[in-house]
Amino acid sequence: MRKSTVCLCWLACCMSIMLVFAGCAKDEVDTTGAIYGIVNDADSGEPVSGVYVVLNPGGKTTNTGSDGRYEFQNMEPGQYTIQISKNGYKTNTKRISVVAGEEASGDMMLERGEARIKLSIGSLSFAKGETSKTFDVMNVGTSGSVSWSVTFSEPWLKVTPAKGSTGQGKSSTVVVNIDRDKITQDVTANLLVEADGESMPVSVSVQFGEGEGGGGDEPFDKKGSCKEIVSCDSEVKVEFLSCVKNADVVEFQFMLTNNREDWQVWFNRDKSDAVDDKGNSYPGYYTKFYVGNSDSFVTNGNAVSFLKGVSIKCRVVVPNIKDEASCLQRLDWQISSSQPWNPQVKKITFTEVKW
């Protein structure tokens, strides 16, 4: 009898332990949520397959199946923005909240019609110390102007202008500023650009870092060096940021701040050559120059806009660097023309750029 009692006690203890572990496992599952949705045609109500779905922040993507369904699992709780798009339809966006242990509904509608606006980028990333970046709203429609507006809710964000109208084939530049006095950690947010029944998000991420608030610390972890930079104009500030070499490719970054009125510049890539410390030359037509967050490098026919008082990060990529070289002794970035004002010298010169 005593033996049976001991066995029963032992069995009860085992069941209790199993229940505790099951509870723990359940708690672990409940720390994340999920998004399930179906995309339907706004006119017919039928499911739409092959819709491209983007989730921000995070940049996760997927496509709807033949039944119009999509899903994102194991999501951290928080606020997200879903953007859906497909050729022949207008882009649509929805804000959604993910709660631990719950399934959020991502059901959305797509309205037929070609998109009339396009954004130059889909995200803005602010490194330590950076406070200002830009993106362009482009009218890609076939007729007329498009009115648009930018909405957001975060107090540390400022957008200029918050609304406007852009003519056919034209673009409008939007400046996004960060008030770092109002943040105490890394933060993310989404701007929504709404126009003509469309809604497109721009995800914003800001790296806080130590030493914020005017402490005098360097805002970037600098790599490499530059002995001297001769700007094209006394009112155009150029500050070296970093330089790295990967295999035979050198990339260096700098910050350009235009302190005069808004400025449109055409650069001459072909004449923007470089020479290393061993006398090897690098023709400009192989060198790539990027402005801001654009993935497209500047060509001779492209104009670049620099707004007054706005700092823009630029980078130069020089391929085929010789093994014996230890630095770029000189690199000239030539300016072919500009408006509405001309610089004092039509080039920016970098001397002894080391990696």
Image: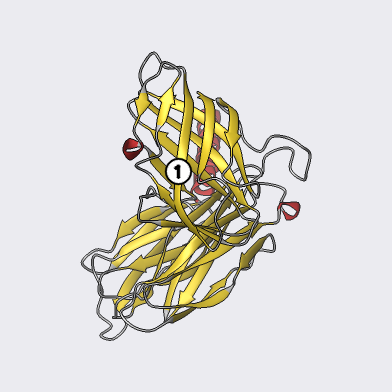
- From the viewer's perspective, is residue 21 above or below residue 155? above
Q: In this view, does 85 lie above or below 58?
A: below
Residue nearest the viewer, comparing 313 with 30: 313
* Front-most of residues 153 and 273: 273
Q: Which corner quadrant of the image does residue 316 belong to?
A: top left
**Is 322 situated above or below 137?**
above
How far across and how far down the image is residue 268, in percent?
39, 47
> Which residue is painted at 35% across and 29% down in the image?
282
For image coordinates 49% across by 57% down, the residue present is 338
Q: Is residue 128 left or right of residue 224?
A: right
Nearest the camera: 261 or 172?
261
Query: Residue shown at 60%/30% (left/top)?
Result: 228
The reply, left or right, for residue 2 in relation to residue 116 is: right
Residue at (59%, 72%) from the top-left corner? Answer: 162
Q: Quick one: which residue is furthest to the bottom in this view?
A: 43
Compared with 249, 190 (above or below) is below
Outermost residue, left direction?
A: 66
Q: Can residue 352 be seen in this view?
A: yes
For the residue marked with disc 1, what is the amino acid? Answer: Gln
Residue bearing the label numbered 1: 334
